[in-house]
Image (tube, rainbow, N blue to C red):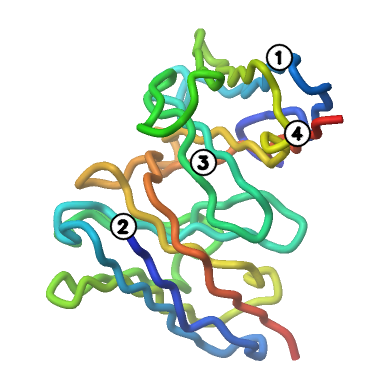
Amino acid sequence: QSVLTQPPSASVTPGQRVTISCSGSSPNIGSNYVYWYQHYPGTAPKLLIYKNNQRPSGVPDRFSGSKSGTSASLAISGLRSEDEADYYCAVWDDSLSGPIFGGGTKLTVL
Amino acid sequence: EVQLVDSGGDLVQPGRSLRLSCVASGFTFDDYAMHWVRQAPGKGLEWVSGISWNSGTIGYAGSVKGRFTISRDNAKNSLFLQMNSLRAEDTALYYCVKDMYTSPSSNFEYWGQGTLVTVSS
């Protein structure tokens, strides 16, 4: 079981908005930046959000990140079929002295 | 264009060793920390190990500490992972990953395509 808790799955219809949560604790989310990754199985994962809410060049503004206390969220608006993928949060953990991932959320676009 | 080409994955017996390699191009390799991240079949992503730009800072996940050794050769733009005493639970797709910073962080900026390690008798 991961130190960071994400819902294992989410289902949304095209055009809708979805929020994926990532719950942690003081040594990780409470003290450090949160990152989000998009992963299509069989391909290389992609950095989606860095430093809680920053988008790398090329990532659409439909994707946004936020953090409050020991929790973080990834929001995706105007959902498209190509958004169907696995999403992971990641953060440095001061207690473990290394980065940790959430368990991942499989997003299905119905 | 950043490219990370992972290699070295194979089918090995429990208890044996394997060495993974990653050749980087498209950026100044010795300016950035590098990592290995793995994904076991049907499981999520797991950080394995990270190394700073000058090899001065190295970290390992608890599950591999004492068995795996990360290293880099900046002259050859290469990252390595020496894996000893392999176990069935080490079976996974191993990704070479570029950090955005000089020291290890959780900012995994670019990922290789992965190399498959299967540990089975």
Of marks 3 and 1, the one in the foreground: 1
Up-down: is B33 above or below A73? below
> In the rendering, at what x and y percent does residue B59 appear?
35, 55
**B9 on left or right of B111:** right
Q: Which residue is mark 4?
A: A107
**4 vs 1, front mark:** 1
Question: For mark 1, what is the residue?
Answer: A17
Mark 2–mark 4 Cα distance, whole angstroms, equals: 28 Å
The residue positioned 74% from the left and 63% from the top of the image is B41
Label 2's element? loop
Q: CA distance from mark 2 to mark 3?
A: 24 Å
The residue wearing badge 2 is B2
Residue B118 place in picture, x, y as percent: 66, 80
Q: Would you place residue B52 above or below residue B12 in this image?
A: above
- The answer to whether marks 2 and 3 sit on the same chain is no
Specify which label sits upstream in the sequence, 4 or 1: 1
Report in which chain the residue with disc 4 lies. Answer: A
Image quadrant where one finds the N terminus of chain B: bottom left
Secondary element type, mark 1: loop
Q: Quadrant of residue A31?
A: top left
Image quarter of residue A6: top right
Q: Relative to the observer, which residue lies in front, A16 or B74?
A: A16
Circle 3 SS class = strand
Residue type at mark 3 is Ile
Q: What residue is disc 3 on?
A: A100
Taking A55 as reference, is B31 left or right? left
Measured Cα–Cα span from mark 4 to mark 1: 12 Å
Q: Chain of mark 2?
A: B
- Which amino acid does the dot numbered 4 rest on? Leu
